[in-house]
Amino acid sequence: MSEPAAAEGTGATSARSWLEPESRSRRLLFALAIYAGCLVVFALMAGDRLSTHTPYNHFAHLADAWLHGRQDLRGGAPGYAGNNDFAVFDGKTFISFPPFPAILMAPIVWIAGSPENFRDAQFIVWLAGIGPAVLFLVFEKMRRTERSARTEAENLQLALLFAFGTVYFYTAVQGTVWFAAHVVGIGLTALFVLFALDVERPLLAGLMLGCMFLTRTTTLLLGAFFVFELIRASYTRRSKEALPTEGTFEHRLRTTLRGVHWRWVASRAVVFAVPVAGALLLASWMNYTRFGDPRPWAFGHEYLTVGWQTRIRRWGLFSYHFLPRNLGVMLASLPWRLPPGEALAGRPPFVISGHGVALWFTTPLYFWLLRPSRVTFLTWAAGIAALGPLVMNLLYQNSGWFQFGYRFSNDYAVMLFVMLAIGVRRMGRAFWMAALWAIAWNLVGAATFEREKFGALYSHDPNAVYPVD
């Protein structure tokens, strides 16, 4: 064999080795392909948003304040933002959104020289493919450890369905402050689950959870997932067998707790808790120095200069009072048809409430969670973890307004897809019909939401369907 032929053969062998089944390099290449695919699609859907800053580039302004040695905005709220969601306290203007996205943006804002020179939507689009890519790695880890019966191809499909068949699709292409936090939060949550599975990386799992809290405060409750994994990993490590599945719940619980290696649990829990505690302390310091309030979750939303300030003062940021409205938005809000006369006057034939459409309408795949073919300890861990932010969001004073779909579901969507990966028996015809519906409707949201030429498609009256005060 000649030297060139030998070199060619060696190169082909090397390329094949990168794609060797069950290899780490293969998983990473597939994850990179998912990221690249998402990047292309999200960038195309974002369109002209990539070339300038958005009108609601709050995180860039927070980063700019830090770069000038202060926490309040140097010139107050920028005029182009319409005074939308800025907190005013003691005559100063603050950004009341949790700060981690601003931490990510700060170096580039410094290079850009000002918030207006920083393209925040483009920055978020570059990040948006991380969540689906890492979620694929989560699914693959579940498959390798026999905690999911999905194939590699199905895991790839599920990751792409998360990207394009949920409200994450339209979320990823906005760039504005509310949606930027969701994009960052999804990436962090996927990494948190990846590191928490089997308690493989407790320090990194804790770091991700701390950053999640500094991005979307209610996602701190997803930490329950790590607690479940910690108990399970300790039991299996000590007993060399799976968790008990026979007998009553009380018997199984007692057997599990007796088999836990509590010293091992404590050592991992401390490692996990250190970065979480650091994030809470940072938040407490930040809130105390701005508002005199040391509570780590008190980022100042009660000082927002918004139209619903009255209801915040009356009912607080979280209250049972808001539950009926939020449940209605999450489960029952649907597009409605206009009267024939209005539909003929150059308007679309239906209208979407600014509260958004129901979660099952945008992602009917979630119906498969109601009758899973398989329920495991990991199913319960993900489900109970998801319940925390789900309930808190239902009690929140805001439904997610203004939105195409129920955007708060981004806070726990990763956990729901973990449950889907475990519980779906077969991704058959009905599943793929639901998937195509989900992709089609979320494509509508990504293409039309907050686009001037599609403004008539959305109702901007917050009281049109769900009175809020």
Image (tube, rainbow, N blue to C red):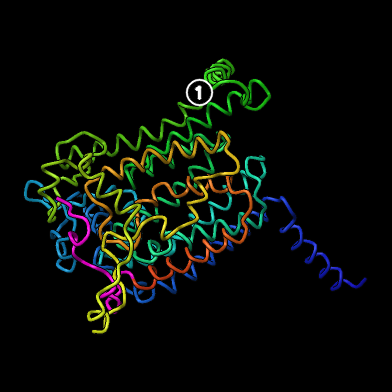
Pinpoint residue 371: horizontal percent, then vertical percent. Answer: 53, 45
Q: Residue at x 48, y 34 (%)?
A: 226
Towards the viewer: 119 or 322:
322
Looking at the image, residue 283 lies above or below residue 124: above
Displayed quadrant of residue 32? bottom right
- Indicate whether 401 appears above or below 373: below
| Residue 157, above or below 222 | below
* Magenta stretch encompasses residue 462: yes
Amino acid type of the residue tagged 1 in the rendering? Ser
Horizontal side of 101 relative to 307 (left or right) equals: right
Residue 101 on the magenta span: no
Location of residue 377 by image quarter: top right
Report the side of 34 relative to 66 (left or right).
right
Q: Residue at x 48, y 45 (%)?
A: 415
Name the residue nearer the viewer: 194 or 61: 194
Q: Quadrant of the N terminus?
A: bottom right
Measured from the top left, where is residue 235 in percent x and y? 60, 23
Q: Position of residue 253 (x, y in %)?
A: 53, 20
Residue receiving disc 1: 267
On the rendered structure, is 200 left or right of 363?
A: right
Which residue occupies the foreground of this view, 24 or 357? 357
Residue 154, position as x, y percentages in the image: 63, 56
Q: Residue at x 30, y 78 (%)?
A: 348
Q: Residue furthest right?
A: 1
- Magenta residues? 449-469
**Secondary structure of the residue carrying numbered label 1:** helix
Q: Is the stretch drawn in magenta largely helix, strand or loop? A: loop
Q: Count neighbours of disc 1 (C-alpha within 10 A) and say few if under 14, some if 14 to 19, many if 20 or more.
A: few
